[in-house]
Image (spheres, rainbow, N blue to C red):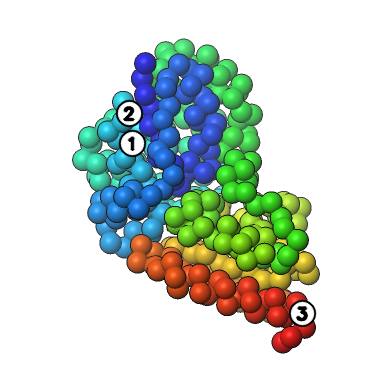
């Protein structure tokens, strides 16, 4: 039986679950890399160019971990999931980066998923990805449809993300956390921020928890189109949080060197200041970030919000 390896990072948090189910139904064994650990980060850092963002470095660490444990590595080239909106350029180059970093030591399954041009692109991607396992495209497509309704498959609102982070709300402060899903779900990348907030008596509200109906008016009001999938969601959800009186504060967690993030968080911060008095804490992470510094800033922020709630400020 063929084993297909999947790095538990980046695109995995957008559509990994459905691809796992798809390949398994077609008869392959699927192995997903374990949760990020320090050795995976170290390997990724050693394989990456210096100015890559930390999530890409971590992805390469996961890919290297899986390369020795599978026949094929699944690394989709995720270009676009909806018209006129695109993934970060790093997503587009993932198969190339993996090939270069691993020096072609493992065969890749790297279908291109570009729904910006036509919904049929998904069909082509599915058939191509399955060609290693099935010579019958009709069966592959039938399995795909069974595994998931095609239109919703790679949605950035995949339920898996919410399940992956236990965001059950506690009674205390409600704090919005703006970040990419692959940062916040990964406990090493986010330094366990959601758990830490919970320990401090606060609940983390993620962009994926905000209803689309609440996001849309803020995107429409902006008057220009945001071309990046994740960032569009982050901006709209962030503005919805800023307009929600039950949200006491907002924490931005961004990767150092993230191009789309630096633009969208700057736009959000400026718009948010004009609209709302909600305090915003901005945390930037890379492989050199010290946990103690992040915890200190979190504690100070939560302390400040608690005092404000009690009317002590
Ligand atoms: S959006 Fe930012 S953090 Fe995500 S892959 Fe692109 S550069 Fe890295």
Tell me the number on the disc at residue 66. 1
Give whichever of discs 1 and 3 has the lower sequence position: 1
Residue 247 at x, y percent in the picture: 73, 67
Left or right of residue 230: residue 41 = left
Using the image, determine if residue 77 lies above or below residue 144. Answer: below
Total numbered badges shown on the rendered structure:
3
Give whichever of discs 3 and 2 has the lower sequence position: 2
Q: Which quarter of the image is occupied by the N terminus?
A: top left
Tell me the number on the disc at residue 77. none
- CA gap, disc 1 and disc 2: 6 Å
Left or right of residue 268: residue 1 = left
Label 3: state its secondary structure: loop
Q: Quadrant of residue 277?
A: bottom right
| Identity of the residue drawn at 67% across and 64% down | 202
- Residue with the most extreme front position: 199
Label 2: state its secondary structure: loop
Residue 259 at x, y percent in the picture: 44, 63
Q: Nearer the viewer, mark 3 or mark 2?
A: 3
Using the image, determine if residue 146 lies above or below residue 206. Answer: above
Label 1: state its secondary structure: helix
| Identity of the residue drawn at 77% across and 83% down | 311
The residue carrying pointer 1 sits among few (fewer than 14), some (14 to 19) or many (20 or more) residues within 10 Å by Cα, namely many
Q: Which residue is mark 2?
A: 70
- CA gap, disc 1 and disc 3: 50 Å
The residue carrying pointer 2 sits among few (fewer than 14), some (14 to 19) or many (20 or more) residues within 10 Å by Cα, namely many
Using the image, determine if residue 139 lies above or below residue 122. Answer: above
Whether tag 1 and tag 2 are in contact, CB under 8 A, the answer is yes
Question: Is disc 2's CB within 8 Å of ligand 1?
Answer: no
| Identity of the residue drawn at 69% across and 51% down | 168
Q: Is any part of residue 31 visible from this angle? A: yes
Q: Which residue is mark 3?
A: 310
Q: Quadrant of residue 196?
A: bottom right
């Amino acid at each position: 039986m063929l084993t297909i390896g999947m790095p538990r990072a980046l695109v995995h948090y957008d559509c990994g679950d459905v691809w796992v189910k798809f390949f398994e139904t077609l008869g392959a064994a699927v192995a997903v890399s374990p949760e990020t650990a320090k050795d995976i980060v170290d390997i990724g850092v050693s394989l990456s160019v210096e100015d890559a963002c930390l999530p890409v470095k971590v992805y390469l660490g996961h890919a290297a971990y899986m390369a020795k444990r599978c026949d094929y590595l699944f690394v989709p080239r995720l270009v676009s999931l909806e018209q006129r909106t695109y993934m970060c350029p790093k997503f587009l180059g993932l198969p190339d980066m993996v090939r270069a970093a691993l020096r072609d030591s493992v065969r890749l399954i790297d279908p291109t998923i570009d729904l910006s041009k036509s919904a049929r692109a998904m069909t082509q991607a599915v058939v191509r990805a399955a060609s290693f396992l099935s010579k019958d495209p009709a069966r592959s497509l039938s399995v795909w449809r069974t595994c998931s309704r095609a239109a919703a498959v790679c949605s950035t609102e995949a339920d898996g993300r919410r399940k992956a982070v236990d965001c059950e709300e506690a009674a205390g402060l409600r704090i919005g956390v703006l970040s990419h899903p692959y940062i916040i779900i990964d406990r090493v990348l986010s330094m366990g921020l959601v758990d830490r907030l919970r320990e401090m008596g606060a609940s983390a509200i993620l962009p994926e928890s905000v209803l689309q109906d609440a996001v849309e008016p803020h995107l429409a009001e902006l008057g220009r189109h945001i071309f990046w999938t994740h960032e569009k969601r982050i901006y709209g959800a962030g503005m919805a949080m800023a307009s929600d009186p039950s949200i006491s504060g907002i924490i931005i967690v961004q990767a150092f060197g993230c191009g789309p993030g630096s633009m969208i968080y700057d736009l959000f911060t400026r718009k948010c200041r004009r609209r709302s008095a909600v305090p915003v804490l901005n945390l930037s992470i890379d492989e050199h970030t010290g946990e103690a510094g992040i915890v200190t800033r979190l504690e100070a922020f939560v302390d400040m919000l608690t005092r404000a709630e009690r009317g002590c400020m």
